[in-house]
Image: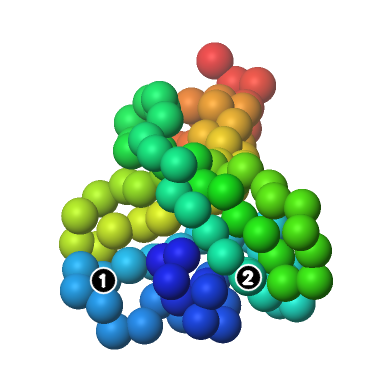
């Protein structure tokens, strides 16, 4: 995934890799070109494998540390940490009645 970004692929372009890889990265701007990256290693996370990555964008020397989570095998989903958290927070805010399509206030 990081090599794809380095080579100019968008987050939606997973290429023809095996295993199949899907990337969810809503934070990445289309004009953010990657100059280099370094995978720093695995970091703790619930329900996924998580990795810290130091990235440097073209036009800047200031690196940034990002976290990505890998879920699944084939297909594999790679989420930027913020996107992963937003999905879980949204799911937690929904009450069981909301999920079933019923009014939330009914017993």
Q: Quadrant of residue 76?
A: bottom left
What is the spatial separation of the Cα atoms under label 1 and label 2, in whole angstroms? 25 Å
Residue 100: x and y in percent read 46, 38
Q: Nearer the viewer, residue 5 or 104?
A: 5
Instruction: Quickly name the residue at label 2.
Output: 35
Colouring used for the render: rainbow
Q: Is residue 58 above or below residue 106?
A: below
Q: Quadrant of the C terminus?
A: top right
Q: Is residue 73 above or below residue 98?
A: below
Q: Residue at x 80, y 71 (%)?
A: 59
Q: Secondary structure at mark 1?
A: loop
- Of residues 46 and 55, the one drawn nearer to the viewer in this rendering: 55
Nearer-the-camera pick, 56 or 88: 56
Which mark's residue is nearer the viewer, 1 or 2?
Answer: 2
Position of 47 relative to 83 (above/below) = above
What residue sits right under mark 1 in the picture?
20
Residue at (66, 59) in percent of width and height: 56
Q: Is residue 92 visible?
A: yes
The x, y position of residue 10, in whole percent, is 56, 77
- What residue is at 68 percent from the left and 48 percent from the top? 64
- Nearer the observer, 10 or 53: 53
* Residue at the image position 57 percent from the left and 36 percent from the top: 85
Residue 102, position in %: x, y? 54, 36
Left/right of residue 33 with respect to residue 25 in the rendered view: right
């Amino acid at each position: 995934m990081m090599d794809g970004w380095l080579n100019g692929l968008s987050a939606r372009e997973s290429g023809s890799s095996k295993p199949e890889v899907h990337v969810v990265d809503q934070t990445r701007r289309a004009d953010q070109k990657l100059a280099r990256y370094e995978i720093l290693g695995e970091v703790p996370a619930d329900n996924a494998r998580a990795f810290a990555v130091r990235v440097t964008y073209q036009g800047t020397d200031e690196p940034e540390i990002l976290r990505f989570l890998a879920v699944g095998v084939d297909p594999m989903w790679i989420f930027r940490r913020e996107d992963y958290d937003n999905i879980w927070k949204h799911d937690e805010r929904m009450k069981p009645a909301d999920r079933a399509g019923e009014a939330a206030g009914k017993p």
